[in-house]
Image (tube, rainbow, N blue to C red):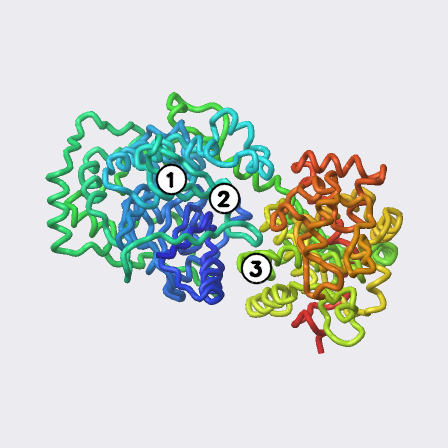
Amino acid sequence: MKIAVEGCMHGDLDNVYKTLKYYERVHDTKIDLLLCCGDFQAVRNEKDLESLNVPPKYRSMNSFWKYYSGEEVAPYPTIFIGGNHEASNYLWELYYGGWAAPNIYFLGFSGVVKFGNLRIGGLSGIYNARNYHLGHFERPPYNESTIRSIYHVREYDVQKLMQVEEPIDIFLSHDWPLGITDCGNWKQLVRFKPFFEKEIQEKTLGSKAAAELLQKLKPPYWFSAHLHCKFAARVQHGEGGPVTNFLALDKCLPGRKFLQIVEIESALGPYEIQYDEEWLAITRRFNSIFPLTRERANFRGLHLDMQDCRQWVRTKLLEKGAIPFVFSRMVPCYDPSKSVSSSSFQGYTRNPQTESLLQFLELPYLLDNMTESSEVSNSPVSSIHRGSLDHNSEDIPLDDEDESEEVAEDDTTFSSMVKLLLQQKKKAQTLMEDRLTALSSRSPVLYHFLILVIAFYKATCPSGAQLSFGFYSVACPSAEFTVRNTVRTASSRDPTIPGKLLRLVFHDCFVEGCDASVLLQGNGTERSDPANGSLDGYSVIDSAKRVLEFFCPETVSCADIVALAARDAVEFAGGPAVQIPTGRRDGKVSSASNVRPNIIDTSFTINEMTKLFSSKGLSLDDLVILSGAHTIGRAHCSAFSDRFKEDSKGKLTLIDASLDGTYAEELMKQCPAQPNPSTTVNTDPETSSLFDNQYYKNLMSKKGLFQSDSVLFSDDRTRELAENFANDQFSFFNSWSRSFVKLTNIGVKTGDEGEIRVSCSSLNA
């Protein structure tokens, strides 16, 4: 069974389903199930947005409403849990689980279902110690406090899951189990999320409740989200015990690792979502102590012998069948052509699915119990946001540390700051235009004077068009993901692809700037020059472009695809993940005569390379750093043949003392005198497919393949930095990230310059 796992959905169902459809076409396969690890945002209409705890600027309808209304149908069975950004009013209707839309199933605040012969369990919400032992006292409409506490995990729901005895195959939680970072590469994690380090060291990162469930249930697979990054871990439960494979995924955004396909052995299909007998028995047994106030659930008098209850549920399921009760559409759906009235709260909606399930289990309907909720909603406490509280203040936390930390994380990322600045700039421009219009009627003389000042400012200042992070976030949100996925697929099939894509971006940016001029075909173009004859990787760029033209016609430039593909190639090969700005436009000039004067020859001296790098705005340090690209890739024998001499008997002898003799012997075996022109060797003889710092270690061992490599270690100006990178891969990766951004910014065309090609190999008609 092929299962797609997604991190934080944030209501972007359209793009996730499109991505999976594309994956199926590329890999000629079929996805059986989609699992989502929270922040699903099942928002049906504008009214639901009032229960979504996000800053107003992030409140948007997104695309779930299409699936709720029936305008779209989920192409895959979809199972999700809740996170901390949900339409909590709707999920409360489905507390026990149920269809949120056709073919889209909510697991409930806690729950277990069957899909085929797999058992899938889940826990919604995030852990907050202050609310953990409280009951479910929140009811819509939520106030400033309850809109946060509604999604805090409760002991009652965890204890229900702790009663599960039969094996669980897959478990979902929104936040990570506490201590899970000890079982994975946490040092690599803090390279990208440095603010996690303190919590990891103090053992406070994650959910205590999820950690307890992990130790009790020991499922083979556990998937999470929440922290907006990808992290894998492997939990060994005792010596020789079962193993849990843990994976956390990011949120659905371009260039983020939000999706993973896993293949799990199972019985043959067709598969469908079904009630789980053991879970229904637990639900029936625990319903008598369902805590509907702030009081803690009383577990002391609970009879936990499940055998009779299991038998009762089994008999009922044999009569009815295990398929969940049918979906019912209960409220008006969002209509883009008109606004839904934001009238005052009209009362609670009983979902027919929930009613039917409770009637089936012969249980009372308790979710609209108003005993305490009405008191809380109407009391003075509900209007207090900060400051002193009444005597119940310890039981009514008005501040959510988990939420504030996540918002802080999002808002302090550089890309978010850039987006915010661009938004503010746009608002400022609109405001200025409005004020100028008003001024023109009140004071024409002053108005014309200001117009002259603005015209002078524009004439004397450089163009405002520039690269920016998230350039395609609105026009083509899937742009970076599409390139990444194309590179990953191609590299999985051919491990030489990363090296080819990295070389391609160098040859593009050094000639005419990073404008995809190297991709243009035809006589006299850069691509036709013999120095570029061995370039490859064009098919990967063309493949990504075809997909992007299908989803976002005439939007994403070939120049950006080349830069993004090289970036993703490095990461795929084990190198650092680098954020680069986008917005490059494609050049219209490509001349073979510009190639030789602008690219490095493998026989260059330090001075020759420094002069060329300097002309591109790159430093001597950048030369040392970017030469590290030779840690992956292959080279033709002719690229280093000047280091050997053919004797009278037609054999090669070493004439370059800077090359290790043993390594030279190996090279001469691979590249004898007059070798086949297609013969290539690894540029890194030790770890040729891995982007690491081995290149610099090779230099220390006199194993630099090219003369231009060896001089970096023999020259006093560059030796120290090369030695540093040989001894410190972390330092190399950090430096690479900065220099790679500089490389991909050389001579870029933005704004009205160049064009957005429809085909990367030819200019637009």
Helix, strand or loop at mark 3: loop
Q: Which residue sits at x=62%, y=39%? A: 412
Q: Seen in the image, is 341 located left or right of residue 135?
A: right
Q: Residue furthest bottom?
A: 765
In the picture of the structure, the residue carrying the numbered disc 2 is 54
The percent coordinates of residue 547 (x first, y second) are: 56, 67
Q: CA distance from mark 2 to mark 1?
A: 33 Å
Q: Which mark is residue 494?
A: 3
Q: CA distance from mark 2 to mark 3?
A: 43 Å
Q: Which residue sits at x=41%, y=59%? A: 65
Q: Nearer the viewer, mark 2 or mark 1?
A: 1
* Amino acid bearing label 1: Thr
In the picture of the structure, the residue carrying the numbered disc 1 is 244
Q: Nearer the viewer, mark 1 or mark 3?
A: 3
The percent coordinates of residue 645 (x first, y second) are: 82, 56
Q: Residues within 10 Å of mark 1 (few under 14, many from 20)?
A: many
Does residue 385 lie above or below 414 as drawn?
above
* Amino acid bearing label 2: Val
Q: In this view of the protein, which residue sits in the foreground, 31 or 645?
A: 645
Q: CA distance from mark 1 to mark 3?
A: 31 Å
Q: Seen in the image, is 661 located left or right of residue 7?
A: right
- Quarter of the image that includes the C terminus: bottom right
The percent coordinates of residue 274 (x first, y second) are: 25, 53
Q: Nearer the viewer, mark 2 or mark 3?
A: 3
Q: Which mark is residue 328?
A: none
Q: In this view of the protein, which residue sits in the foreground, 539 or 45?
A: 539
Mark found first going from the N terminus, 2 or 3:
2
Q: Seen in the image, is 479 located left or right of residue 331?
A: right
Q: In this view of the protein, which residue sits in the foreground, 534 or 77?
A: 534
* Amino acid bearing label 3: Asp
Helix, strand or loop at mark 1: strand
Image marks 1 and 3: residues in contact by CB distance under 8 Å: no
